[in-house]
Image: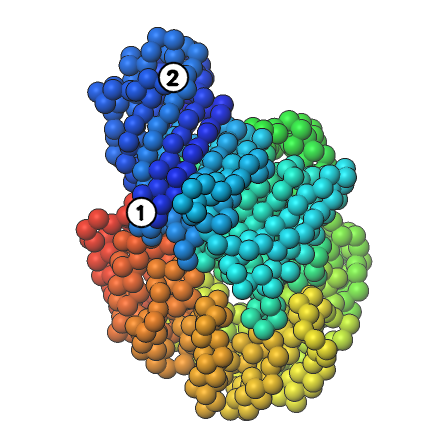
Amino acid sequence: DQTTRLVDYRAPDWLVEETRLNFDLQPTATRVTATLKVKRNGTGPADFRLDGHSMRLLSAAIDGRPVPAEAMIEGEESLTVSAAALPESARESGFEWTCVTEIDPSANTALEGLYMSSGMYCTQCEAEGFRKITFYPDRPDVMARFEVRIEGDAPVLLSNGNLVASGALRDGRRFAEWRDPWPKPSYLFALVAGDLVSHDDRFTTQSGREVALRIWVRPGDEDRCAYAMDALKRSMKWDEEVYGREYDLDLFQIVAVDDFNMGAMENKGLNIFNSKYVLASPETATDADYARIEAIIAHEYFHNWTGDRITCRDWFQLCLKEGLTVFRDQQFSADQRSAPVCRIADVATLRARQFREDSGPLAHPVRPEAYVEINNFYTATVYEKGAELIRMLRLLVGASSYRAALDLYFDRHDGEACTIEDWLRVFEDATGRDLSHFALWYSQAGTPRVSVKEDYDQGVYTLTLAQETKPTPGQREKRPLVIPCAYGFLDADGRNLGEDGLLVLDKAEQSFRFDLPERPVASLFRNFSAPAIVERRISPADRAILMGHDTDPFNRWEAARAFALSIAGELADGGGRIDPDWIAALRTTVTDESLDPAFRALVLALPGDDEIAGEIAAKGGVVDPDAIHHALDQMAETLAEATAPTLRELRAKMAVTGPYAPDAESAGRRSLANAALALLTHVDGGEAAEAAFSKADNMTDSLAALRALVHRGAPGAERALMDFRDRWRSDLLVMDKWLMVQATSPAPGALDRVKALAETDFNWRNPNRFRSLIAAFAAGNPVGFHAADGAGYRFFADWLIAMDDANPQTAARTAGAFETWRRYGERRQALIRTELERIMAKPGISKDMGEIVGRILE
Ligand code: HT7
Ligand code: ZN
């Protein structure tokens, strides 16, 4: 059994106090000498077991004496010196372990451990990559001080902490020595070596310490780092002001890397980033890219306290650092930009990714209890739902108690590897509350459904809330959760009625009574106060009141979304009609100049195909991707026909003058103008989009126009695609956008186009390229991917099989596109099953892929 279980957790037998690493860098044969000062944790004899694989062990010694081969047991992924083979003196107190290993970074296409990207060396050790560098107790509850010496040809040699020495060696080689004073687990170790240049700045902390800031990029990219640097300084200041957290080294470095499995990595003092989330210029990055860069820079920086200084005891506790750090980056973005707009965007992502996960075969608790491959649990549930749990805690205890609890958390647990129990105990101790029932959110998978019943009789309004969570894989029985519901009441004219407040639903069903002078229009779950699905019958008139007057912007948007969703659902089902009240209500909102343009753009956006599919599936219907797409097309077309002059006017009003700036206000104006443009393309044959494309002076407008043309199959689409390619062919990050626009196009012929693109000059081993074309097609092109003959499924499965050999982590993550397969009709299910079984039968399938596809098929 390859499964690791939370219940089997045992404290480590041996701890490491100091880790000295010596790297002799060579592309195909890098030598690593590791010297560990280890000490016994506990009493009595214990084997000395180290994790490790994919490398050659050249020698091992204990206290300077070679360990004979027969004293070491080499497992598939471990090396053990039995307790009996340890020298007497070492058994009780500890010893110095030295081993020399050899690895081949140039052959490492999995991008885990030490690998090469565009000629530079770099590492990715979370979660279990360090064990591909040297034999080590590679678990987060073993924290050591690291000293690193690197020797290599590259001009820049980096590791965690502070630089203590550097210089030239013979044969043009160089060395650098780094010391990180903060004990850390091996997953936070990092090394980078290459021909890099830095964009430098400084930050003075609140206590007056000077910190040197350095962003390292390839020569030529240095003029694209300014925004990331600015976001970093704002993050450092924000963490001091809002959480009282100061940076703790003299140097903070970021390196941009082209080949990277995820967004970025919070290695202590040396964050490594996917270059996509560092590099930005107005010509090459969209407003969304800038917002994402800001959020990820903040996220990784915030990990310095929530992740690095206080880490996880084991990987089941991943949400301890990730949920909290996502919540912190969401708070940061909300403070830097428009809070309601950020909240709406975060909830839209949660629904699109996490609700989908929670309702399918990959559902798991925020704190999972078993895994085969931990890389498969860096999920929307752990991250985004994990963040929602923190948000609920904050709402329940109040902002000042939340801050007090966090102060206590940092005080009590600094330098430790903790659990969710530690986290909740801090809140209990700081607030005197019993959180044992709330803790269920961490262990129970699935999204609760809350049904709403309302009654008004003789001055008394009764609200009855009932909750239910459907069974999820391996968890049939569900218990009621603690669900906070922030509420307010409106009268028939949309004015406030009575007091706002917070209800707490913690039973299967509960009624709440309010004395109110008239029947209220209740605004429930304001600001999305719990990650739940709310089922409520509401009249179109009440919905219009909420949409037009709710003081909670989230619920104004929610009312608009619910209206659009119900129309789309009915149309997709072959019935219904496009209610003119929907169009009238939209027109009123999007032309309301008292409202933020970014908010109006969100209201104007139609629901996504997958969102409608999720609604249909939840009601037990069979999903037909073509019918959904047709319904959305009809809605867009009718809306555009009815409002074309308004849309044109909006575009004119939203025009941004002056040089491009990525600030939230200008970005909001562009997003409204571009939402209008996408709609107009439904009625003008692409005329406005063509004009916009040729006059665009920034990537946001250029890409929006290109997408509008391509996705409508407008006559100007081909020309625009060629122009775009000719201009940007040497900029791979921009070309990713070009690939993605084509991969996600619902216009006919997308699969053939994607196939052709995959055959020409396509570096599929690079995760950004693979995601932009192959993953984007499967996850973002429901019409093409679900083509009735199964060609989309076949194409995708072929690529998953190829990628699984090169990079299991990225392949398995991408395979999640199949997770909703049971939503579709029998024919499509049969076609998908054939592909899933073909993948499962692949000789040498990875643990990563085997686990994901196995769970999808179950
Ligand atoms: N903590 C990091 C998670 C991570 C990762 C990053 C890059 C490549 C592979 C990775 N595996 C896990 C990212 C974060 O949450 O900040
Ligand atoms: Zn993180």
Which numbered tag is attached to residue 736?
none
Please report the residue visible at 72 percent of the width from the left and 34 percent of the height from the top.
404
Please report the residue visible at 35 percent of the width from the left and 41 percent of the height from the top.
30
Is 369 situated above or below 510? above
Callout 1 crowding tier (Cα within 10 Å): few <14, some 14–19, many ≥20 = some
The three-letter amino acid code for the residue at tag 1 is Thr
Instruction: State the image coordinates of residue 110 (x, y, percent, origin top left).
Output: 35, 50
Instruction: State the image coordinates of residue 782 (x, y, percent, origin top left).
Output: 39, 70
Whole-angstrom CA distance, mark 1 to mark 2, is 30 Å
The image quadrant of residue 624 is bottom left
The image quadrant of residue 390 is top right
Please report the residue visible at 51 percent of the width from the left and 59 percent of the height from the top.
218
Residue bearing the label numbered 2: 63
The image quadrant of residue 95 is top left
- Helix, strand or loop status at disc 2: loop
Instruction: State the image coordinates of residue 598 (x, y, percent, origin top left).
Output: 67, 69
CB within 8 Å, label 1 to label 2:
no
Is 197 situated above or below 729? above
Residue bearing the label numbered 1: 28
The three-letter amino acid code for the residue at tag 2 is Asp
Q: Nearer the viewer, residue 317 or 86?
A: 86
Sequence-first tag of 1 and 2: 1
Instruction: State the image coordinates of residue 69 (x, y, percent, origin top left).
Output: 23, 23
